[in-house]
Structures are given as structure tokens and as C-alpha cells.
Image: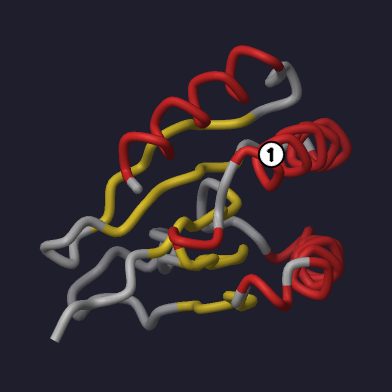
Amino acid sequence: MQMTRIIYVYVDGSDNADNEAELLKAFSELKTRWFELGATLVNQKYEPCEGADVNDLSDWFIGLNIPLSSFGAQQIEHLVPLIQKLAKDMDRDFVVGVTLPSGMTQDLVFLDRCSGEREVAELNLIIQDAH
């Protein structure tokens, strides 16, 4: 059985408590826009590992998953400016990555308040190769 490869867009980091509502609102709106592409909202906070330091934050993924087969240049052109604005408004960075055929994940591009045409071009090249 072949697994469906996905593109993910998540806020980078686990300290999301102060921005959770705003992040979920922004990603929910994008999910609605990309519903026909199969986009799914992610808000997954993991329990800390046994023996973890009490000051360590648990992994917390907030963002969107989109099937790789549905993700292309049009989505990239929309995504990068949107994430750039979120990064600026929230002072947070974001990561775009892909699931590999092995089931592992690979972060592809980090987006921040300064992201723009370079990241659009880089993502377009990577996505073309991944299809």
C-alpha cells in the first residue's frame, strides 16, 4: 500500500499558547480555501516524554497538511505571502516540509517575515522535483 505524501506548513516551535487562537483561525481559513485539495488542519500537542525536564515544552504542531499531488505553483504563490504576514504579525517562523516515501518527514523551507520571491522560487523547484 502506497502512502499519500503530504506537504505540511506548521508554525516552527512548541511555544504556541499565546498565538494558538490566531494560528488556528488563519490555518482554518486556509483549510477552507483549499478544502477541495484535501487540506487538513493540524493542532497536535504531544505529551512530554517520560523523564523530560519540566521546563521542556512538548512538541506542538499547528498548521496544515495538503496532499503533495494537490500542491503546486498556485498554492505556493498564495502561501508564501500569507505565511510572511503571519510571521510578521506574530513574530514567529514557519516551516514547509514534505513526507518522504519512507514515511519520514523533511523540512524544506523556513518562512519568516522576510520571505518572498526567493522562497517561492525555491519551493516551486522542490515541489516540481517531488511530484
Q: Nearer the viewer, residue 26 or 129?
A: 129
Residue at horizontal 75%, vertical 24%?
113
Q: Nearer the viewer, residue 73 or 118?
A: 73
Q: Is residue 77 above or below residue 65?
A: above
Residue at horizontal 79%, vertical 63%?
30
Q: Nearer the viewer, residue 110 or 89?
A: 110
Q: Is residue 59 above or below residue 35?
A: above
Spot occupied by residue 38 in the image (x, y as percentages of width and height): 60, 77
The image quarter in which residue 80 lies? top right
Q: Is residue 13 above or below residue 48?
A: above
Relative to 83, 71 lies left or right: left
Q: Is residue 122 above or below residue 123?
A: above
**Image quadrant containing the N terminus:** bottom left
Residue at horizontal 83%, vertical 67%?
33
The image quarter in which residue 108 lies? top left
Type of amino acid at the residue the image marks with label 1: Arg
Spot occupied by residue 95 in the image (x, y as percentages of width and height): 51, 42
Q: Nearer the viewer, residue 75 or 88?
A: 75
Residue at horizontal 62%, vertical 25%?
120
Q: Which residue was labeled with disc 1?
A: 92
Q: Residues within 10 Å of mark 1 (few under 14, many from 20)?
A: some
Q: How has the structure been colored for display?
A: secondary structure
Spot occupied by residue 24 in the image (x, y as percentages of width and height): 77, 70
Relative to 50, 29 lies left or right: right
Label 1 residue SS: loop
